[in-house]
Image: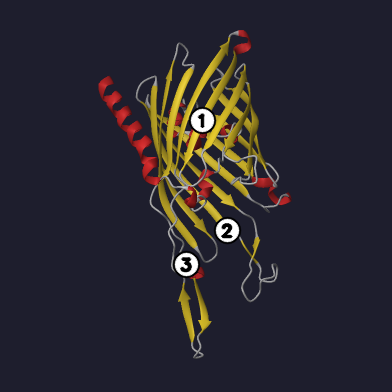
Amino acid sequence: MKRILSILTVVVLTVMLSAPSAYAGNDNRRGTAGATELLINPWARSSSWGGINTSCARGIDAFFSNIAGLSFVEKTEFAYTNTILYGGRSGLVSGASVNAFGLAIRLGEAGVLGAYVMAMGCGDLPVTTVDSPDPGSNGTFSPTMMNLNVAFSYSFTTSIHGGANIKVITESTDNVSASGVAIDAGIQYQTGENDELKFGISLKNIGPALSFGGTGMAFTTTNESGNQMTVQFRESEMELPTCLNIGLSYDFLFEKWNQRLTAAANFTSNAFLRDDFGLGFEYSLLDRFQARAAFVYQRDLFTEERTTAKTGIHAGASVNFPFGKDGDKNISLDYSYRTNTNLKGSHAIGATFKF
């Protein structure tokens, strides 16, 4: 059995490491992917340290960082997070927000089944046309982006955990829409006397290209002969924002007040963006309070050649409230903040229920 698990692990890791070479782009392809909302972390706990917890993600937060971490759900877990992007209605992007709902249930001793929905809205945007380019005179439209995720995670041994996630992607306005399917996969390995050392790898957003369609892709015009004709725009396919995450973390444990300091590092290879390098820390006290901070670096981050609105700083905290007869149930309140250049920061507030 152990030999089979070892072979399976090697095969999965080989596939995950080789897959990005088939999807990776060059500088000429930067920013050309579709469905880039898949790269927005909707969870307060993991976004508070930049999503670099590929190796130590636990519970529903693992949906974004590394789906293998879903296998650490003990019984049933439910989470909700609301994220106000770039200052929300008071910022430069009016009303941009993300809502995420997640549910995970343990099946037997080793398996966990989970699902979550992420919905992103951009508020009311003005309609402009060639004949009427002034905003406000043609009404507004509200684009929405949503993805539905269903995942299964499994503990092969006490040290090796793996998982896969299937997501259905939809983007739409009043007269244009697109849909697609993608797959995430991940593995986590932990070792040490108290499982202090952790390693994780995840491959995200692997799937076929998607394209927009609908009545908004056509317009009516009059030719030189005075005849009206309908012209249909040719649909252009967009590849998904595939990325590979490799992470490592170590727990420094202190007996007094049950303290823990986790140091984590992560590398993200993006097929359509510049690669990210992240370093962060999480401090835990009595399993009641956690504080996190991280910095995620991207090439040219401090120059005019930068290609991201994020400035790399992430921070946040969680407060846990055990309840129940034996304290086996828990409510966690989570908060995170992400800085952005020329835009207001992004705030996320969420709650996680374990019962």
Q: Secondary structure at mark 1?
A: strand
Residue at the outermost right position: 90
Answer above or below: position of 138 versus 229. Answer: above
**Mark number displayed over residue 143:** 2
Amino acid on which the number 2 mark rests in the picture? Pro
As drawn, is 21 to the left or to the right of 28? left
Q: Nearer the viewer, residue 260 or 106?
A: 260
Which residue occupies 50% across, 49% down? 30
Residue 16 appears left or right of 139: left
Please tell me whether mark 1 or mark 3 is closer to you in this view: 1
- Check the image and name the residue furthest to the bottom: 225
**Quadrant of res 295:** top right
Mark 1 sits on what residue?
Answer: 266
- Front residue of 89 and 9: 9
The x and y percentages for residue 148 are 46, 47
Q: Position of residue 277 (x, y in %)?
A: 54, 33
Amino acid at pointer 3: Gly
Q: Earlier in the sequence, mark 1 or mark 3?
A: 3
Residue drawn 56% across and 14% down? 252
Q: Which residue is mark 3?
A: 214
Return the disc, 2 or 1, that comes first in the chain's sequence. 2
Q: Is residue 322 visible?
A: no
How far apart are the alpha carbons under marks 2 and 1?
A: 33 Å
The outermost residue toward the top is 255
For the residues marked 2 and 3, what is the alpha-carbon distance in whole angstroms?
14 Å
Circle 1 residues within 10 Å: few <14, some 14–19, many ≥20: many
Percent coordinates x, y for residue 64 in the rendering: 50, 37
What's the amino acid at mark 1? Answer: Asn
Closer to us: mark 2 or mark 1?
Answer: 1
In the image, residue 21 above or below residue 109: below
What residue is shown at x 44% (from left), y 47% (from top)?
25
